[in-house]
Image (cartoon, grey):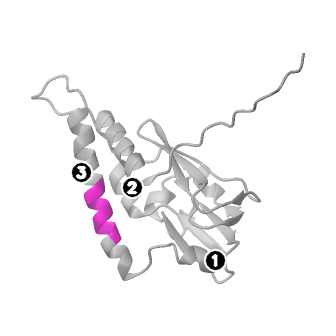
Amino acid sequence: SWVRIEMTGEGRIGLDDFVHKTIGPVAGIDLPEPGSSVRRGDPLFSIHAGGQKLHFSAPLSGKVVHVNHDLDYQLDLLRLRPYEQGWVCTIDPQDLTADLGKLVIGADAVGRYQADVRTYTGRLADELAAEPTVHTTEPRPAEVERRVACRAFSHCFLSPAPQPEVTRQTVRV
């Protein structure tokens, strides 16, 4: 994902080209709630792709100010115009200085991107090798390849899916 600091000080967040190239078309999105507080690294939004739900973490801590409801009706904006109209949400940062120190910025991003590509392609090869095939002479169905690509992407780059909280009740007899 990407984050751009706006003139207002808010962080605008979206999906980068790497996501689209690796997992293919996005079938749906679960936007965050405006006004909700998030911590860096916590789940912020989810996308549906390859029959899976992929959870993306917040790059900044703070309060969700705006969400892009245009994505509810024009999901292709995520891919076609990610930085102008396809952004996901904005966050009013709680401690921008601390969060910026943890982001990969500028020339460092190129090396990180190259390492990410190597990590992903290695994992994808492993996942595809483990996937059962029906006939070795026929190509795999596209939906199988997309499912495997999403699984490899999730394993390499995303935090695990949030687990429901378990509430324990004590009953006195």
Q: Are marks 3 and 1 in contact (CB under 8 Å)?
A: no
Q: Provide residue 144's location: percent of width, then percent of height.
A: 31, 34
Q: Are marks 1 and 2 in contact (CB under 8 Å)?
A: no
- If the image is split into quadrants, where does the C terminus sit? top right
Can you say whether 106 is above or below 25 in the image? below
Residue 167 is left or right of residue 47, and the answer is right
The residue located at (37%, 78%) in the rendering is 108
At label 1, the amino acid type is Leu
Q: Which region of the structure is painted magenta?
A: 112-119
Residue 64 image-quadrant placement: bottom right
Question: Residue 154: within the magenta?
Answer: no
Can you say whether 132 is above or below 44 in the image? above
Residue 58 is left or right of residue 53, and the answer is right
Disc 1 marks which residue?
96
Find the distance from the CA under tag 2 to the CA under tag 3: 18 Å
Total numbered badges shown on the rendered structure: 3
Disc 3 marks which residue?
122
Residue 100 image-quadrant placement: bottom right
**Which marked residue is nearer to the observer: mark 1 or mark 2?**
1
Q: Provide residue 170's location: percent of width, then percent of height.
A: 83, 26
At label 3, the amino acid type is Gly
SS for dot 1: helix
The residue located at (48%, 54%) in the rendering is 76
Circle nearer the N terminus (2, 3): 2
Disc 2 marks which residue?
20
The residue located at (70%, 33%) in the rendering is 166
Furthest toward the front, the residue is 173
Circle nearer the N terminus (3, 1): 1
Q: Residues within 10 Å of mark 3 (few under 14, many from 20)?
A: few
SS for dot 3: helix
Furthest toward the bottom, the residue is 7
Q: Residues within 10 Å of mark 1 (few under 14, many from 20)?
A: some
